[in-house]
Image (tube, rainbow, N blue to C red):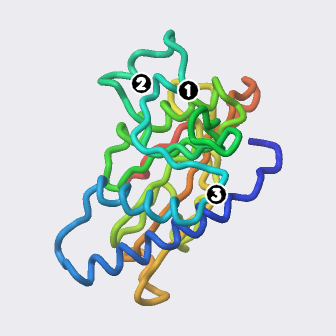
Amino acid sequence: MTKRLAPTPKWINQSLQGITYWIGHRRALYSGYALGESALVAELCNMIYTHISSDHVLRCEVQYTELLPGDSDVTILASKARVDIVVARKKDGKREGATPEFVIEVKRASASKAQIDNDLRRLAAVKKHHPNITAYLIVIAEAERPKRFVDEKGVACSQVYQIPETSQLYRVRRVFKATHSFTSRDRAQYACLVEISPAQPRARMRRAEPWKAKSS
């Protein structure tokens, strides 16, 4: 990730800002009931579908076997693993044969480190085999600051980290939030956009480290 990164797409920026407002709205309606990951994915799909251009198509719950060769690491493809969202460019204006351009996993910030790392590894496998595909992990937090991805100021952590058991890196590209006051950084709704790098040379990997939770 040493090269200058392309700007994040407008459609994903709009969708992630929107999901934070939507979470705040749902919390106002159903205070005390946490939103399930499936509900977050469903609403995010609705927003992305609204904002992508007409020459793209949105697919949900796509099996990784459609994106990776059969000899890929079986541990990351266990139980017919599926990617949450794929945005593909239509071919000759048709959905059939559309070319995947964006592969997206969605995780609640309350998920375990192992669960988040597994999603990063699966996305890394796709990015390694298809360097032209953009691979994103979206981490959504409900009334909490996801400390792995957002610093004390409420902005994206600037450090680049290793993805465990790969030769690839990830970094937080954007952080979107909605809060009832400017000082409530730890109780805001967050949507973090995390991008996965292509395979990196050993020298680059040696300059980065895996993320570790800070001891309290």
Residue 144 position, x and y percent, is 36, 69
Tell me the SS state at disc 3: loop
- Residue 216 in view: no
Q: Mark 1 or mark 2, which is nearer the start of the sequence?
A: 2
Residue type, label 3: Ser
- Where is 175 relative to 194, above or below? below
Q: Residue furthest right?
A: 3
Q: Nearer the viewer, residue 153 or 69?
A: 69
What is the number of the mark on residue 112? Answer: none
Q: Identify the residue under disc 2.
A: 76
Residue type, label 1: Ala
Tell me the SS state at disc 1: helix
Q: Identify the residue under disc 1.
A: 125
- Residue 137 in view: yes
User: What residue is drawn where x is 44% and y is 90%?
Assistant: 181
Residue type, label 2: Ile
Circles 2 and 1 in contact, beta carbons < 8 Å:
yes
Picture quadrant where residue 113 is located: top left
Residue 162 position, x and y percent, is 58, 36
Label 2 packing within 10 angstroms: few (<14), some (14-19), many (20+): some
User: What residue is drawn where x is 63% and y is 26%?
Assistant: 167
What is the number of the mark on residue 54? Answer: 3
In the image: residue 28, left or right of residue 189: left
Q: Mark 3 or mark 2, which is nearer the start of the sequence?
A: 3
Circles 3 and 1 in contact, beta carbons < 8 Å:
no
